[in-house]
Image (spheres, rainbow, N blue to C red):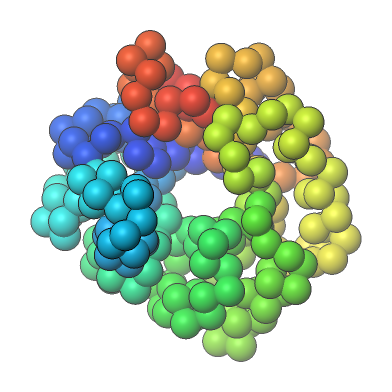
Amino acid sequence: MVKVIAEVANAHEGSVERAIKIAKDAGESGADAVKFQIYFGPDLLTKDHPRYEHFCNQAFNEDEWHLIISEARKYNKSIIADVFGMEALKVAIFNQVDGIKIHSSDLSNIPLIQESAKANVPIFLATGGSTIIEIKDAINALRLLDFKHEINLMHGYQAYPTKINNNDLLRISKLKEFFGDNVSYGFMDHTDGSDPHSVYLPALAISLGCSVIEKHIIDNRDKKGIDYYSSLEK
């Protein structure tokens, strides 16, 4: 069975109300899960980074996350969280999310991966910007803890929107050659939401053995807000 994850990312633009609205849209769309990116500015970027203030302005505090996730549960069967750092992971575990995703930029962050295993939920490892050795080390870090839940390797090109010829879906087959049936496979599609391929490519990924499809969701593409490029409406 294929699971579809609706990724909110930063489409909320720092608004609690909009985050809840998009989560509601995700549930109404029929998606199997909604996913949030949990982060705090100081853990994500240095203060002299040009986008530091941008991400600080979009980050929610712990109370806001509790409200957002509590409300999202009213509309969604499952809540998944991208965690960017230990503080973000603490928020995800406190709110009892149903899955943890490790971004490709953190795939070498073994302490974060092993701490995530304590949530006792499936883990999604983003592999789009990672080498085979990094992926193997991340999987081994979980196996060393006798991790019993599902491990999902999520292929996806790290550019927004992704050009069609950069998606490299055949890398899914390559991942399967290396890691076999001991893990599951998924596709994070960042194709332009206005392009018909944004629907066709996930279908092709399923034919290659993916059981998880992640698509960005936004409440209104016409507003051309943050993260609209790769997003679909409900």
How many labels, in total? Answer: 0
**Nearer-the-camera pick, 49 or 146:** 49
Where residue 19 sits, quadrant-wise, is: top left
Choose between 99 and 53: the one closer to the eye: 53
Q: Residue at x 37, y 69 (%)?
A: 85
The location of residue 188, given as percent across then percent down, is 60, 42
| x 34%, y 64%: residue | 46
| Relative vertical location of residue 227 with respect to residue 60 in this rendering, above or below | above
Horizontal placement of 34 versus 126: left or right?
left
Q: Considering only vertical position in the picture, is 170 above or below 28?
A: below
Q: Quadrant of residue 89?
A: bottom left
Q: Is residue 4 visible?
A: no
- Residue 90 percent location from the top left of the image: 28, 71
Q: Which corner quadrant holds the C terminus?
A: top left
User: Residue at point 78% right, 31% down?
Assistant: 165
Who's the residue at 78% across and 49% down the image?
A: 172
Expressed as whole percent of the image width and height from the top left, the position of residue 91 reads 26, 64
Q: Given the current orientation, which residue lies at the most extreme top position?
A: 222
Looking at this view, name the residue that lies furthest to the left. Answer: 63
Tell me: residue 152, above or below residue 159: below
Which one is nearer the viewer's eye here, 210 or 217? 217
Is any atom of residue 180 visible in this view? yes
Could you tell whether 52 is left or right of 210 in the image?
Answer: left
Q: Position of residue 52 (x, y in %)?
A: 30, 53
The quarter of the image holding the N terminus is: top right
The image quarter containing residue 180 is bottom right
